[in-house]
Every structure is written in C-alpha cells, then in structure tokens.
Amino acid sequence: MTVIIAFLANILVAIAKTVAAVLTSSASMVAEAAHSWADAGNEVFLLIADRRGARAKDERHPLGYGRAAFVWSLIAAFGIFTAGSIVSIMHGIQELSETGPVESPTVAYIVLGIAFVLEGASFTQAMVRSRALARERGSSTWDYVLDTSDTTLRAVFFEDMAALVGLVIAGGAIALHQITGVAAWDAIGSILVGVLLGVVAVILIGRNIAFLVGANASPALRSRVGRALLASPEIQRVTYLHIEYVGPNRLFIVAEVDLSGDAREHDVARRLREIEQQIEAHPIVETVVLSLSVDDEESLAFEGGAR
C-alpha cells in the first residue's frame, strides 16, 4: 500500500511539474519534473521487488526468492541516480549561461505547493509506519529506516523525504531568481536537486548492496533469536548462531545447540527437525538449520536473559 500511494502521488505530481516546466521555462521545474518521473518509474521496480521477493521457496531456491527484492530495489536506486540526479545536474549546468527570466512564476509556485501537499501525504504515511515499527523494536525512526531489511519502505521513505526537500529548493531558487534578477539561481536550484537525488541514490544503493552480499543481523535481533531458541524446553544451550537476511524481513538461521536429556541418535535427529519446523512457523523465518554442539564449546549468552 505504501508503494501504491507513493506511485499515484508521483504520477500526479510529475504531470503537474512537467506542465509547469513547459509554461515557466524554469530549470528548477525541469529538475523537479525529472525527479518525479524518476520516482514514479522507481515505484514500478519496487512493486516488482515486492512480488518477486514474496514467492515461496522451492527446490531450486531453498532459501526463497527474497533477495530478488534487493536486486530490483537496487535497479530502482540506479534509476534515481541516472534519470533524476544526472539529468537535473546536467540541465542545471546547461542553464547557467541563460539569462532569461522564469515565465509565469505563479504557476510554478502553485504546482510546487500542490506537489508539497501530495508528497507530504505520502511521506506522512511512510513516516507513521516507520515510527510504529521502530517503536516495536526499541530504536529511533531514523536508525530503523537505515537498518531495516524492508527495502521498499526505506526507498519510499527516502524518496518522499528527498521530494519534499527538493520542492523547497526549487521554490527557493525561483524566488531568488525573482528577487535578485539573477537567472543563475534557477539553474543552481536544478543542480542542487540533482545533488540531493545523488546522495539519496548512493544511500539506497549502498544499503541494497549490503543486504545482497550478506548484512550482519543487529545485536538486538541476535539476542531476540538466541532467547527464542533458549525458550524452547528442548534446547539446553546454544554454542553457535548465524543469522542472515535472505529477503525483506526473511531470516536464514543456523545454530548449534545442546538438547535437554540424553536421547538416542535417531531421536536427536527427529527432535532437531521438530524444533526447526516450530521455528520456521514464525512469519519472518525462511529456513532454520540446527545441529548438535560439541561438548567443549562455550555457551553463548544473549542480552536479556539466557540459560
């Protein structure tokens, strides 16, 4: 729903900005139009990411298809950089030598104001969701958005935030052009919007690459998983724990454990598989692999209590 709202908002805003760019001949409005069209195109990639990443695991993909979401989100981030950032910067540089005034600036201000309302509504929806999820995990909203494996939420959050900042930059550039009579301000506004988009693209590209190559689970998540394992009456201790994201909110867990009691070998295998199935029933767990600990290995301790 977050992506669909952002997509509809971006389409409406892109059309309005394009019309305003034609009517005003403003470089800043051209940059903003390119920004919104790039964002709208990126939402399509994010929708594909959600669909591809949600497919259930099968024999060919035993860890599921979740990483496909990171791939498509990476493509979307490159779209911001190429269609948004580079176009805006290059157009701004070309317009630096222009001396003509912005025509019908009132049209630009009206479109920017409407766009701010629409983008603000989309950003508010993303912010509310992010804040609620961050509160559940005991972290700040900013830290949650940066660290979450939900690549779609992060993309929408940053795109909408950049859109609001870009609108302020464009409006300020046009106003400075009007006040000072210096046409370069409008071109500078276009360049600044491009730089802003470049920064956002680099952040999103970096986070998607991190998850594709195997980002470490946070200490808080590691503690929660460890405590959940120890909460099972079948498990006496945990000596090894590896947690890896294999998709947005999808975990691959490998652990070495000691089982309670002194079961025979064939009973141990059955008990381990039963515990794996219990853990895999959790909606964020894709696959669990448990094996027996070696006697002389130290037990892992997890913050918040362990045994």
Image (cartoon, rainbow, N blue to C red):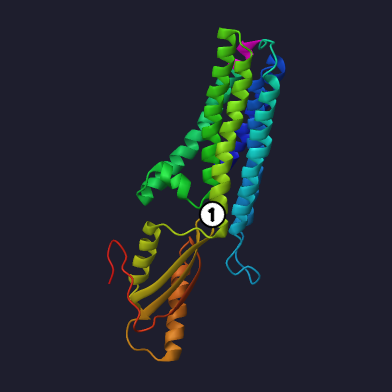
Q: Indicate the quadrant containing the N terminus: top left, top right, bottom left or bottom right.
A: top right
Q: Which residue is mark 1?
A: 210
- Is residue 269 in sight in this rendering? yes
Amino acid type, label 1: Ala
Dot 1 falls on a residue whose secondary structure is helix
Which image quarter holds the C terminus?
Answer: bottom left
Depth check: give the residue in front, 55 or 214. Answer: 214
What residue occupies the far bottom of the structure in this picture?
264
In the orientation shown, which residue stands out farthest toward the front?
Answer: 97
Magenta stretch containing residue 213, yes or no?
no
Location of residue 94 (image quadrant)? top right
Residue 255 vs 35, above or below: the answer is: below
For image coordinates 40% across by 44% down, the residue present is: 132
Residue range in magenta is 104-109
Image coordinates for residue 2, horizontal then vertical, percent: 54, 41
Residue 234 position by quadrant: bottom left
